[in-house]
Image: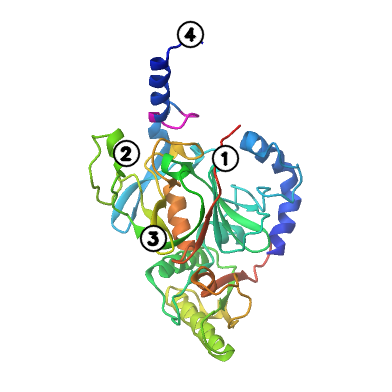
Amino acid sequence: MAYLAARGLRGGMMAIGLVLALAGCSTMEKVASPDVTDAPVGAGVDIPAGSNEDFIVNVGRRIYFTEKSAELNDTARVTLDKQAEFLAQYPQWKIKVEGFADEPGTAEFNMQLSQKRAEVTRAYLISKGVAPIRTRIKAFGNTELVKKCADVTCYSQNRRAVIVLEGRSGA
Amino acid sequence: MAMDRRQFLAGAGALVAAPTGAFAQDVNEAAFFKGSATDNGVTFRRTNLQKIDKVWRRQLVKYKSEEAPGTIVVDTRNNFLYVIFENHTALRYGVGVGKEGFQWFGRARIDRKAIWPQWVPPPEMLLRRPELPKFMAGGADNPLGPRALYLYRDGRDLGYRLHGTTEPWSIGGDVSSGCIRLLNEDVMDLYQRSPVGTLVLVLEHINRG
């Protein structure tokens, strides 16, 4: 996500005054610097169609799984269907399908489950028209957790697949 | 002031019953809709996003706090809801905060989600507005809109919901009833990003100065 921060700092300085003005007295006590809550990151509301930010904000990169499962539920399919549409509309992108797990059991078990999640996700996107050659997979097991704690508020966030856009040629 | 107590209370009552202060009586409601869409078999009016103030539109922002990525934070004072991402960023939505939305704060968990949820108005609301039905099936006229996310704590339904709206002009303001309302497109988006088990932190509402 470092690229987002870089874009935000370049483009964000001009937008900050506008954001502060629109937010009114709720931000009067904030320091006018780009590194505070509510400072814009990226393009704000005028996101270029087909950009990585469009994918993140308007399509969604993540799907979630229930415990020990690599099955896609209805909610996951809604997101993946939108991703397939985006990828059909913007063929310059490739994707890396990342699988993750945070299940009771060994690191090996988590690695296999995360691999399965990534494979199932990729297979579904291919079934919706994404050319296999545009896709690759990476399994992370129970590493790179979003949240670390011993309850469902963390597990639910970690049991995921993330579809990352890559390899865009040009801007 | 020369106003007597009865006049003051009548005025205060009218204020509570009115839609959000910034838009009051003259809002051209039709202008806030543009076209229609169908979702899960329900056809509904789409929001005209051009009429929504940019500050209330869904966008990526910096988010500096102790809260971990994968947490939803509801700021009822400033009418924002944040989904915290990695690297001190968040996806921020504008919200309308209803009376019930001010009545609770703290940590909760989304234990249940619904698509085109049915609605049972709380007893206090039925007292205030006896013309409301006791039960309303899900659909385009239902004030909860296309999605509801139900907040629980220790297995108990708090009665606190994140939901959609039939009044997109009310986003960014305080409204007389309901919990936390988002634009319908935004609550559908939030639903996709919020698996059951997601932690929600509702910040304490401190009266505006």
The disc placed on residue B44 is: none
Local secondary structure at mark 4: loop
Local secondary structure at mark 2: helix
Span shown in magenta: B17-23
Do the residues bearing badges 2 and 1 touch, measured as CB atoms within 8 Å? no
Instruction: Tell me which label, 3 or 4, sits earlier in the chain.
Output: 4
Q: Few, some or many C-alpha atoms within 10 Å of disc 1 (few <14, some 14-19, many ≥20)? A: few
Q: Few, some or many C-alpha atoms within 10 Å of disc 3 (few <14, some 14-19, many ≥20)? A: few
The answer for which chain carries disc 3 is: B
Distance between the Cα atoms at labels 3 and 1?
Answer: 25 Å
Is the magenta region chiefly helix, strand or loop? loop
Residue A70 x/y as whole percent = 45, 81
Frontmost residue, B140 versus A106:
A106
The answer for which chain carries disc 4 is: B
Whether labels 1 and 4 share one chain: yes
Mark 4: which amino acid? Ala
The answer for which chain carries disc 2 is: B
Would you name the residue on which mark 3 appears? B156
Would you name the residue on which mark 4 appears? B2
On screen, residue B98 above or below A61: above
Mark 2: which amino acid? Met
Would you name the residue on which mark 2 appears? B125
Instruction: Name which residue lies at 58% across and 83% down.
Output: A141
Would you name the residue on which mark 1 appears? B206
